[in-house]
Image: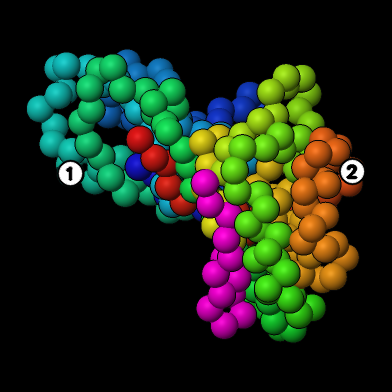
Amino acid sequence: TIAYDGANYAGFQWQPNDISVQQRLEEALQKLFPSVKRIHGSSRTDTGVHARGMVAHVDVPNTRSEMTTSKLRLALNANLPEDIRISLVQRVSSAFHARFDARGKQYRYFIWNHPAMDPLRRSQTWHMPRKLDLEPMRDAARRFVGKHDFESFANCRSYKIDDHVRTLHRCDILRRGPLLTVAIEGDGFLYKMCRGIVGTLVYVGEGKLQPSEIDKILKRRDRRVAGMTAPAHGLVLWKVFY
């Protein structure tokens, strides 16, 4: 289980022309196990997105299997940059796959809703200086729960995706003073889907959209009719479920 600050990385997945979290993890592993070529992550995160609960698996040589999980965690963290940390190491069945065995994920998006930004949160929280109306936002959030076509909330990739249907089990908004936390949990997510949902919820909070319009936007299947894509730095992959 991996936590990282995504500010300095082009996402989790390996990139040919940029630095990714996966690359740094593989470099650390190869110092311990030179034969290791690839780790397998449970999810992709975009450039600038953070994680507390990214899961990955790796096959290590049997000749090194005597290393305890606590020692492996210590050794890996000693070879990683400070913005990437392994929080948990455990042995799993050889049949386990971090991506294909995942049953769902939870993302959290953080919004600082105050005229003045908290400078200690500036790199991991979206600053919204205008007051947001929380009750309409919560009404709108509930409308995302269930099985829907989320094409209106996902950005286009360079390749075509035929299936935009996903199931959300949770979409709610928690408030602690000026800090709003949007918790989104589901069986899978489209490209920038969480950020599209959050940007649309902010439009509702500003009065630019009514909660009832969410149902119509879902049916339109057109990204242009929904709200903006929220900035990457407010999003955290919180947990992967198995």
Which circle marks residue 218 in the picture? none
**Quadrant showing the C terminus:** top left
Q: Is residue 198 above or below residue 125?
A: above
Q: Is residue 82 above or below residue 35?
A: below
Magenta segment, which residues?
169-181
Q: Quadrant of residue 205?
A: bottom right
Q: Quadrant of residue 135?
A: bottom right
Which circle marks residue 70 in the picture? 1
**Of marks 2 and 1, the one in the foreground:** 2
What is the chief secondary structure element of the magenta stretch? Answer: strand
Residue 187, visible in the rendered structure: yes
Amino acid under disc 2: Arg
Identify the residue at horizontal 73%, vertical 69% (top origin).
Answer: 136
Q: Is residue 111 above or below residue 96?
A: below
Depth order, front residue of 232/65: 232
Contact (Cβ within 8 Å) of mark 2 with mark 1: no
Q: Upstream in the sequence, badge 2 or badge 1? A: 1
Identify the residue at horizontal 75%, vertical 56% (top origin).
Answer: 199
Identify the residue at horizontal 39%, vertical 40% (top origin).
Answer: 241
Depth order, front residue of 15/106: 106
Q: How many marks?
A: 2
| Residue that carries the numbered disc 2 in the rendered image | 224
Is residue 164 toward the left or the right of residue 93 in the image? right
